[in-house]
Image: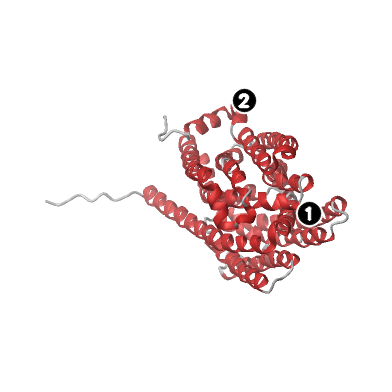
Amino acid sequence: MLRRVKIPNLSQLKSRSQLRTILSNTGWLFADRMLRMGAGLFVGVWVARYLGTEQYGILNYGLAFVSLFTPIFTLGLDDVVIRHLVRESSNKEEILGTTFGLKLIGGIVSVLLVVGSILFLETNKILTIWLVTILAITGIFRSADTIDLWFQSQVQSKYSVIAKNIAYLLSILIKVALILSKASLIAFAWVTLGEIVIGAIALMVIYHIRGFSRLWNWRWNLSTAKSLLRESFPLIFSGFAILIFMKIDQIMLGQMKGDGEVGIYSAAVRISELWYFIPTTIVSSLAPSIYAAKEKSEYHYYKRIGQLLRLLTYISLMISIPMTFLSKYVVAIMFGSGYANAGPILAVHIWASLFVFMGVATSPWFVAEKLNHVSLGKTLFGAILNVILNFLLIPGYGGVGAAIATIVSQAVAAFFSNAVDRRTHKLFKIQIHSFLPFSPN
């Protein structure tokens, strides 16, 4: 008897092909982050041990200070541009050219603002001023990340991974050489700048070799620029607020407790934030499919958001629970006895990951619903709360107080605020359901 063979229809084949593409893209991004996590953590710890708490504190203070100005050279464009490229890939030369121009202008402005601010705040700290100035110049060369946005929109992040890891591995080798040759602190800032420059060149070369289009065919369009900025404008301020969450604690610790305290706190935060690549990697691969689902089916759109939230919530809990009890030993093994006080800080700060993962998971929803202004309001409120709590807790509790401030402010902005806003009630319910092992349809 002949057996009937079921032939999948075209939509099934297309769906399977899209799934394979997403999984492949996610695999490349995870490989990238795993490489950075492994090599970067090893060399980063070596650098921390080599520099000691004081100079390591200065380095991280400088990195945190420069990062606060990141929204000026990114202009909040990334998610908005990816969505436009998904919908209007035939118009990519105009979108990419305009985005590159905006990011280049933003990079130049950010350098001027960073240098002016550090000169005003740290008048007598010449080493800090030079270090921050060198790190600030990276903003100009990050305009080449426009190419990365195209790769993300096409779910082809492997090309960005290859380009950026060429630069990253070179920087790792140079940092090892600097440690062995007993180089000064300022040399490590130059390596950071060099990595960004080489990565930008590698992105351009790979984009050209793959023949996606000629870079010189990119074109600027003023009306496109205005349109993109109108959408991204709330995200610029949201980006500031997010970075206040992530970095203001180190800056306030430096101002209120000194560079040594920043060094100890930075060691704990380095381990705690080590895992943040997980949500960003997963969401960068899944966001295009969420935007596409929004156009076709509301049911599948919310189903994908729910699945994403549940996945990231569970991953964050799997990290936070064991790290709470093992933090003292992890710090001792990695950083040595000089950083012993980072253990209690890590045990507290690690719980911020639960709300960070949630916040990243919900970001495509705010973009797809065109509620960036709502996201901005929640994030700004959380950022202000973070500053206030840092001001109240750091004098008495130091790094532990800064960690508590981070958790509370992240929880309010990414989770609890959605319960009191009728526009985000549905999202809050999905967040609640993400703690359950099943979807309560």
Decide which of 142, 355 is in the foreground and name it: 355
Amino acid tagged 1 = Ser
Q: Which residue is mark 2?
A: 420
Query: Does residue 283 show up?
Result: no
- The image quarter containing residue 195 is bottom right
Q: Regarding mark 1 in the picture, which secondary structure is present there? A: helix
Residue extending farthest left = 1
Q: Residue 306 location, x and y as percent?
A: 48, 37
What's the CA distance linking mark 2 and mark 1? 35 Å
Apparent side of residue 97 relative to residue 419 in the rendered image (left or right): right
Decide which of 161, 401 is in the foreground and name it: 401
Please report the residue visible at 61 percent of the width from the left and 63 percent of the height from the top. 46
> In the figure, 22 relative to 171: above or below?
above
> In the figure, 431 relative to 311: above or below?
above
Q: Residue 263 location, x and y as percent?
A: 69, 53
Q: Residue 375 location, x and y as percent?
A: 65, 36
Q: Which residue is mark 1?
A: 110
Decide which of 224, 408 is in the foreground and name it: 408
Please report the residue visible at 73 percent of the width from the left and 36 percent of the height from the top. 384
Q: Regarding mark 2 in the picture, which secondary structure is present there? A: loop
Q: Residue 393 location, x and y as percent?
A: 71, 36
Query: Does residue 96 show up?
Result: yes
Residue extending farthest front = 337
Apparent side of residue 32 relative to residue 222 in the rendered image (left or right): left
- The image quarter containing residue 101 is bottom right
